Image: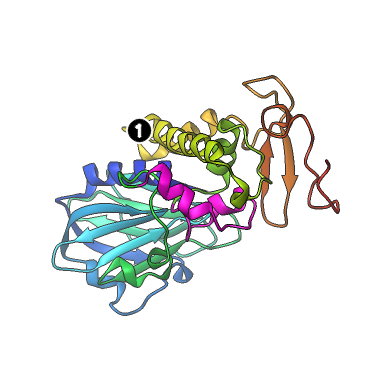
């Protein structure tokens, strides 16, 4: 799933390639992708793009005098830029293409989604706050005013495990499954630690890991073409998606906990004092 660093890089890429250019056609290929109907999708046509913004994992294409085109790429969505779009309208079918945006000069981009679970979402709204997912977002962890005290305040009454708290978009915007694993590994913290039990020292460590991990990922992605962002993300992850591989810090074997629709990865030596965490398929956490 694209998370804050990749969406931030896409925002920068689209700012460079879209701003100042006119949208002439927006062509939905998968009808399920469109989550609003008023104003219609065609309302963005004939308008110049004036800005591209990010809200958590949401991308907002702002048009001058027209509505906002807001996208959430979900788990398997992506954006593919084309300097020259194919001639003729795209054909609906079983392929990954979900929506095409065509510019006046022949360039444009496709929104695609792999797999069978189609969750990619596109909204046409007068204000991004009209998108429910945007309206409920918590603070952005890379914002200038997101300091250690704010993180402490967010977590002090949280009775959930820290892994789940970090992934909650209503608590902190933009962090998903992959980067929450990376942040907790950098903080040398168990994903099962209860958020409300963090000491002031724990909060300091977690804050530094949160800001550092995301900032480094954004910097690595900055300036890359949209098509290279996925590979860049995968190549730099230390624990997420690396079950069975050696930890790059201590050499211990990276382990996994599986859930119904996701999994987490961690290093026992770095994060849990050498003790493995029980898989959800077992009844308890090994102590």
Q: Position of residue 118 (x, y in %)?
A: 55, 63
Give the residues drawn in magenta, as a range: 146-173
Residue 50 appears left or right of 272 = left
Q: Position of residue 142 (x, y in %)?
A: 36, 43
On the image, which quarter does residue 139 sit in?
bottom left
Q: Which residue lies under the disc numbered 1?
A: 224
In this view, the residue in front, 231 or 28, is: 231
Q: Position of residue 4 (x, y in %)?
A: 42, 46
Looking at the image, the residue that sits furthest to the bottom is: 38
Q: Tell whether position 243 is magenta.
A: no
On the image, which quarter does residue 55 sit in?
bottom left
In this view, the residue in front, 236 or 268, is: 268
Residue 8 appears left or right of 183 = left
Q: Position of residue 162 (x, y in %)?
A: 60, 48
Quick check: 175 above or below 42? above
Numbered disc 1: secondary structure: loop
Q: Is residue 114 visible?
A: no
Crowding at dot 1, Cα within 10 Å, few <14 / some 14-19 / many 20+, comes out as some
Looking at the image, the residue that sits furthest to the right is: 283
Residue drawn at the location 58% of the way across and 57% of the way down: 158
Position of the C terminus, as image quadrant, is: top right
Q: Is residue 68 visible?
A: yes
Residue drawn at the location 83% of the way across and 42% of the way down: 286
Quick check: 170 above or below 210? below
On the image, which quarter does residue 44 sit in?
bottom left
Quick check: 55 above or below 239? below
Residue 261 appears left or right of 11 = right
Residue drawn at the location 60% of the way across and 33% of the way down: 185
Tally of marks: 1
């Amino acid at each position: 799933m694209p998370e804050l660093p990749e969406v931030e890089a896409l925002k920068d890429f689209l700012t460079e390639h879209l701003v100042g250019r006119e949208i002439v056609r927006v062509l939905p290929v998968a009808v399920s992708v469109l989550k609003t109907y008023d104003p219609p999708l065609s309302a963005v046509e004939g308008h110049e793009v004036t800005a591209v913004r990010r809200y958590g994992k949401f991308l907002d294409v702002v048009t001058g005098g027209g509505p906002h085109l807001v996208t959430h790429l979900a788990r398997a969505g992506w954006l593919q830029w084309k300097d020259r779009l194919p001639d003729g309208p795209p054909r609906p079918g079983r392929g990954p293409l979900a929506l095409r945006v065509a510019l006046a000069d022949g360039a444009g981009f496709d929104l695609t989604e792999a797999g069978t679970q189609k969750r990619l979402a596109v909204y046409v709204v007068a204000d991004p706050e009209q998108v429910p997912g945007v309206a409920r977002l918590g603070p952005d962890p890379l914002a200038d005013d997101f300091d250690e005290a704010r993180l402490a305040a967010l977590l002090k009454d949280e009775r959930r495990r820290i892994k789940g708290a970090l992934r909650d978009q209503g608590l902190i915007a933009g962090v998903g499954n992959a980067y929450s694993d990376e942040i907790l590994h950098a903080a040398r913290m168990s994903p099962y630690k209860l958020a409300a039990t963090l000491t002031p020292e724990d909060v300091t460590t977690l804050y530094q890991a949160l800001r550092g991990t995301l900032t480094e990922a954004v910097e690595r992605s900055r300036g890359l073409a949209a098509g290279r962002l996925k590979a860049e993300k995968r190549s730099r992850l230390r624990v997420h998606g690396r079950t069975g591989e050696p930890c790059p810090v201590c050499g211990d074997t990276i382990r996994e906990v599986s859930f119904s629709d996701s999994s987490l990865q961690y290093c026992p030596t770095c994060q849990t004092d050498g003790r493995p965490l029980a898989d959800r398929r077992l009844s308890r956490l090994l102590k």
